[in-house]
Amino acid sequence: MRSTTTFGLFMALAAGLALSGCGGGGTTTAAPLPVTAADSVARSTDSVTVPRIQRLRSYNIDPDKVFIAGISSGGFFGVQMQVAHSKTFKGAAIYAGGVYFCALDSVVTALVACGGEGLYASTLAESELYLDQQSAAGTIDDERNLRRQPIYMWSGTADTVVKQAEMNDLQTEYEHYGARIVKYDNAFAAEHGWESPDGELACGTLASPFMITCDIGTRPYDSERIWMSAFFGPLRERNDRKLEGQLVNFDQTEFGAAATNSMDTNGYVFVPRECSQYRRCGLVLALHGCLQTQADIGTKFITESGINEWADSNGVIVIYPYAIKSSTVPVNPQGCWDWWGYDDPNYALKSGTQTTIVYKMVERVMDRR
């Protein structure tokens, strides 16, 4: 995402395309949280207490209820994760993302075709060809797993970062592989951002922290309710009071996260109280966008995304991994997820560096490692 003056999926990259780089408000800005594994001071974020960084533990997860959600670079990366591991992920909620392998391993293509300052050129045909090839080669899971998977999509008509045409291509791609579009929200005059009743910015605002609220009539829209109910069935009411679950600050380094792959030392997992008792629960992997790192907006992606409020009352664990900015190799000045190859040319495959690291976190929570 971009700042209020230079926002763009890749505008920070424009000064160094030969190197590579990506792009993802309000009245207040949260101070960055400490990110060193040595941190031992308990902190509080809104209604939950965040303890010192600890080892990620396993839970009793229903393997048929594992999904992914992401915004902007997290939307592109989320599509990659879902396609590469379509045997594990059973559906996706994508906000302002795009087709699988959209950038074709090129920061220039990422900038001029998939996002940026209102730029777009379709890479749908190349995406599907690559997906078919990799599925046949076994470097990603069998593409047939995508059939009938529930998909939620969000794209604002006023999005100046990822054109709605790119999300239209994604809809076409999902339908090509037999996925089921439960809803494509594409009529709101929304700028680039994650929509939630808890977002601090107005719907048409383009600014940090890129968490927006769009109204339907006289009340805030709730896009999370749409896809959570599609993924998990009839829902108990959203918990708008103090959350009963725990937000756990966990160590990402044991899974391979490091500055050398532009990933933070710590991430978070929200665990509803009932899930901590080893009741069988659902799982969502939630991916932030560019300029939504902890250094940029603290934990606002977590506290304003509106996911935990539904998860808390419906037995759904939510993993929030974090990337970081990097001005040296790998060049990632806006803290984006790797969806154009800044870190690894195999970024869209199961063997991709960040894909592997994040998937190990999912496996741990699912008690597979």
Image (spheres, rainbow, N blue to C red):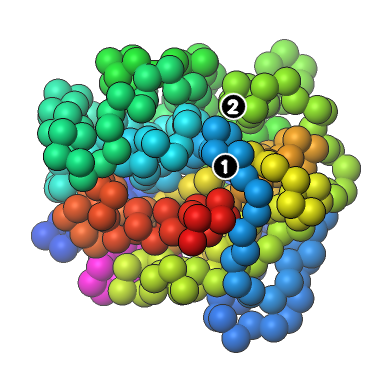
Q: Are marks 1 and 2 in contact (CB under 8 Å)?
A: yes
Q: Which class describes the residues within 10 Å of circle 2: few (<14), some (14-19), or many (20+)? A: many
Q: Which class describes the residues within 10 Å of circle 1: few (<14), some (14-19), or many (20+)? A: many
Q: In this picture, which residue range is highlighted in magenta? A: 324-333
Q: In the picture, residue 212 is in which quadrant?
A: top right
- Label 2, on which residue? 231
Q: Is residue 362 above or below residue 150?
A: below
Compare residues 52 and 196 and report the one nearer the observer: 52
Q: In this view, does 196 lie above or below 254?
A: above
18 on left or right of 357: left
Residue 193 visible? The answer is: no
Compare residues 77 and 361 and report the one nearer the observer: 361
- Label 1, on which residue? 284
Please give the name of the residue rendered at 71% of the width and 59% of the height, measured from the top-left corner: 247
Percent x, y of residue 324 = 42, 65
224 on left or right of 290: right
Please give the name of the residue rendered at 52% of the width and 15% of the height, measured from the top-left corner: 182
